Amino acid sequence: MKIPDEKELGFMEKLAQKGISRRDFMKFCTMMAATLALPASFAPKIAEAIEKSKRPSLVWLEFQDCAGNTESFLRASKPTVVEIVLNLLSVDYHETIMAPAGKQAEKSLDDVVKNQKGKYITVVEGAIPTKDGGVYCCIGGRSAVDIVKEVCGNAMATIAVGACAWDGGWPAASPNPTGAKGVKDVVSGITLINLPGCPMNVQNLTGVVVHLLTFGALPATDELGRPLFAYGERIHDHCERRAHFDAGQYVRQWGDEGHRLGWCLYEMGCKGPETFQNCPTIRWNDATNWPVGSGHGCIGCASPRFWDTMTPFYRRLPKVPGFGVEATADKIGLGLAAVTAAGVVAHGIARAVKGKGPEQGEKKE
């Protein structure tokens, strides 16, 4: 009996060989519909598009980084996200996980760029040093600046993953000795979507890829190039500790009674009130938990230049968007307690400014 070649197998047959059932696959499609803020009825459409799609090539570039985004990608397991994504895409170049090395590895990248111009996807991880001709990050004798301009310039789409690839992240923090920048500030005129975070959540990356394969286009973005399905709403508005904020119940010291009871971490420096990302809803480590749920405040890593604008991480924000420019943490606690007693839902006050968009909470340079 002839054993079929892998190239002859269909998408579902390849998944079956890895122990992924049709049921597992449909769960994945349903999860992707939820991630993309689509009705569950879109799951069959997503499944059909994925099964019929031709696997596009993906090249993953790493520059000034800690490989945190690669770790986020590889550590996903439920519902077998990585296995499914690796069957959706042909990952032809990724320094961290690929078998070839040296000239063979560089040939893999060159072949994609030359032979699949305008057909492949590029993922960029890490900041790009631009000072002194870009000498602070070189691969195969070429600077990161040269590589990213050529590879991203010929790609169908580029996805900048993590804070560093977005706007330079912590390598670009003052005084920025290497002149680190994000993709958007180094390469112009490309189709680019940004997934900031430290690191990005693999579910959001998968959502972008699935949207591209299903609809033939990248998802809608905000003014900062971030997909609205992932960065369209404030963390504060979906936080499980929000009720304690509304009631004026704050953690005042690490380990105090409020901390043990799960009260609001705003006064301990939580940046949730002005950070836009879907951490509270999709969470981390297979949706097990997220920083605020485990007792640590949000550090605003999806916000512009967070290393400079959100530090010190353990100092509370002076103002909260949506509650008036003169409001302080103490006044908010007292005011909301009175409002609650009067029967007015404080959450409605914050939501009244929903239509103003993410820029209300973001800090500008």
Image (cartoon, helix red, strand yellow):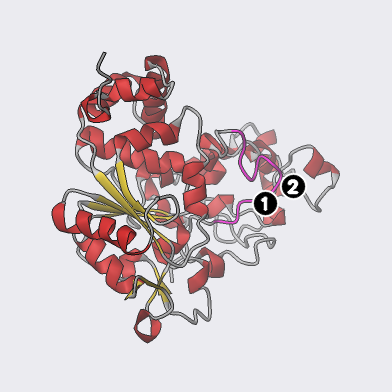
Q: Locate residue 199, reporting x and y percent.
A: 51, 52
Residue 285 seen in the figure: yes
| Residue at image mark 1 | 266
Q: At 19% across and 64% down in the image, what residue appears?
A: 189
Q: Is residue 296 magenta?
A: yes
Q: Which label's residue is closer to the chain start, 1 or 2?
A: 2
Q: At 40% across and 50% down in the image, what residue appears?
A: 99
Helix, strand or loop under label 2: loop
Does 357 sit left or right of 336 as displayed? left
90 versus 138 height, above or below: above
Q: At 24% across and 32% down in the image, what residue appears?
A: 214
Q: Is residue 258 magenta?
A: no
Q: At 68% across and 55% down in the image, what residue appears?
A: 329
* Residue 218 or residue 303, whichever sits in front: 218
* Residue 54 or residue 278, whichever sits in front: 54
Residue flagged by tag 1: what amino acid is it?
Tyr
Q: Main secondary structure of the magenta part?
A: loop
Q: Quadrant of residue 127?
A: bottom left
| Label 1 to label 2: alpha-carbon separation | 7 Å
Q: Locate residue 200, reporting x and y percent.
A: 47, 49
Q: Quadrant of residue 166?
A: bottom left
Q: Residues within 10 Å of mark 2 (few under 14, many from 20)?
A: many
Helix, strand or loop under label 1: helix
Assess whether mark 2 and mark 1 are in contact (beta carbons under 8 angstroms).
Answer: yes
Q: Quadrant of residue 261?
A: top right
Which span of residues is magenta-colored?
A: 288-300
Residue flagged by tag 2: what amino acid is it?
Tyr
| Residue at image mark 2 | 250
Does 189 sit left or right of 27 as displayed? left
